[in-house]
Image: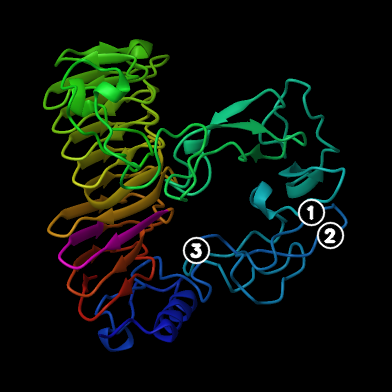
Amino acid sequence: MKRASPATGVACGVVGMLLATLPPLGCSASDNSTGLLSGAGGGSLGSAGSASAGGAGRPGSSGGGGSSAGSETSGGEPSHLGGEPGSAGQRAGGGTASTTDKCRSDNDCVQVDDSCFVCEVAGAAKDCVDKGPPSCDNGVLEPCEVCELDDVKDCKELGEPGQYSAGTAKCLVTCAGWDTTSCAVCGDGEREESESCEGDEPPGPHTCADEGLAVNPLTIIPCTDECRFDTTLCGGCSKDAAVCLSGTPCSGSACDGAESKTGLSCEFDCAFSGKNCKNVRCNHGSSCDFACNTRGGCAGVVCDTGASCDLHCSAGNCDNAVCKAGAACSFDCHGTGSCQRITCQPGSDCDFDCDEAGPHCSGAVTCGAGKACNFSCNGGSDCSGLAVICPTGAACTFSCKGEGSVCPKADCREGSSCVFSCAGGDCNSPICEDDACSGT
């Protein structure tokens, strides 16, 4: 088994930096053990492998500065505020910060107690400006605040994709984040208040009758990976489903908590401004079509095992969707569409269209063995927030063409096939075992 040498990837990234202003030359195949011609146009990642820019520094007289090297994993010395960006974490070919701008975003500003620094235009250039301490619980979400005291949030929207299975988080008293102590973690061996069961198997046979359901009363129901009993085996929808659709459509908020009955086809009309369908479930064997475009919303969709889901999210919101093992999901998130914190479980089949989308596609995707998963991030789209595992037997294609385009971070295992097309963009230094990667 042969893995791509980290040193080789770094060398290729450095060459990309030095030649960023020249016509695209790329690194030769002999310089890259993956066989992938990286560095085309935008270059590969720098030595830290971070997608974030450098330009870090110690806080200056204005009260702000960058992170120590543009990356939490880098180890270099920070440059002074307004100086040259640090090499670690800077994307090759991306250029350097303006000599007049001292920050690019709020993330470049160092925070101190009793102050809140934001990056904004101060005079003729951007600088870290002190806005004073946030006023927690004044009803206004201010810079440096994540929430207000009475705010609550679904735990499944927090942490890493799939980290929390249920529960509701409250805003911390500092308004700087969320209190996740009441969030359930399925599979941790402890049955929490919001969980019906724990682990792959319940402690004993559990039937539909035990759940008080008259349909298929003797059917034994398993515990799911969300730590709830799979009551869809009783009547086609979960016991607590807000609406059980028997092949009929629903629209807007009437879809909240709705489920498609197992084995049927359903349409969810959630397109256009003001229409939001939350926490919809496409049950086993169902085929579901979600119209979530043009400022519509379909947050929290679950596409269950054996189901097929098409989510049309252009200029809409399809965040926090889960594509279960054995499901097939298609995400159209091009333009200003948002498909963030998506989870495609191992064994799923997921396709992403994130063309011209900016950094609006993120999450964790593991393509299924024998499946073909496609990722389109052309036209300046930054898909570096997507972490993709292409396991043995899977085929993954990545198209990241055009200036500013960045591929998902790919881990291509032995026996998989990863094909890259990155002309003018950035392949994002994929990890490749043996001859798993090809393309330019």
Between 30 and 230, which is closer to the camera in this rendering? Answer: 230
- Residue indicated by mark 3: 94
Q: Amino acid at mark 3?
A: Gly
The quadrant where residue 370 appears? bottom left
Proximity of marks 1 and 2: CB atoms separated by less than 8 Å: yes
Q: Which residues are magenta?
A: 386-398
Between 316 and 146, which is closer to the camera in this rendering? Answer: 146
Residue 243: % across, % down = 29, 13
The quadrant where residue 24 appears? bottom left
Q: Residue at x 37, y 47 (%)?
A: 199
Image position of 81 (left or right of 30) = right
Pair 1/3: label in front: 1
Label 2: element kind: loop
Q: Residue furthest front?
A: 204
The quadrant where residue 433 appears? bottom left
Q: Residues within 10 Å of mark 1 (few under 14, many from 20)?
A: many
Q: Residue furthest bottom?
A: 30
Q: Above or below — where is 87 with respect to 343?
A: below
| Sequence-first tag of 1 and 3 | 1
Label 1: element kind: loop
What is the number of callouts on the image? 3
- Residue indicated by mark 1: 64
Image position of 161 (left or right of 117) = left
Q: Residue at x 22, y 49 (%)?
A: 348
Q: Residue at x 32, y 67 (%)?
A: 411
- Evaluate whether residue 245 shows in this view: yes
Q: Marks 1 and 3, how far apart in space?
A: 23 Å
Q: Marks 3 and 2, how far apart in space?
A: 25 Å
- Residue indicated by mark 2: 60
Q: Amino acid at mark 2?
A: Gly
Q: Amino acid at mark 1?
A: Gly
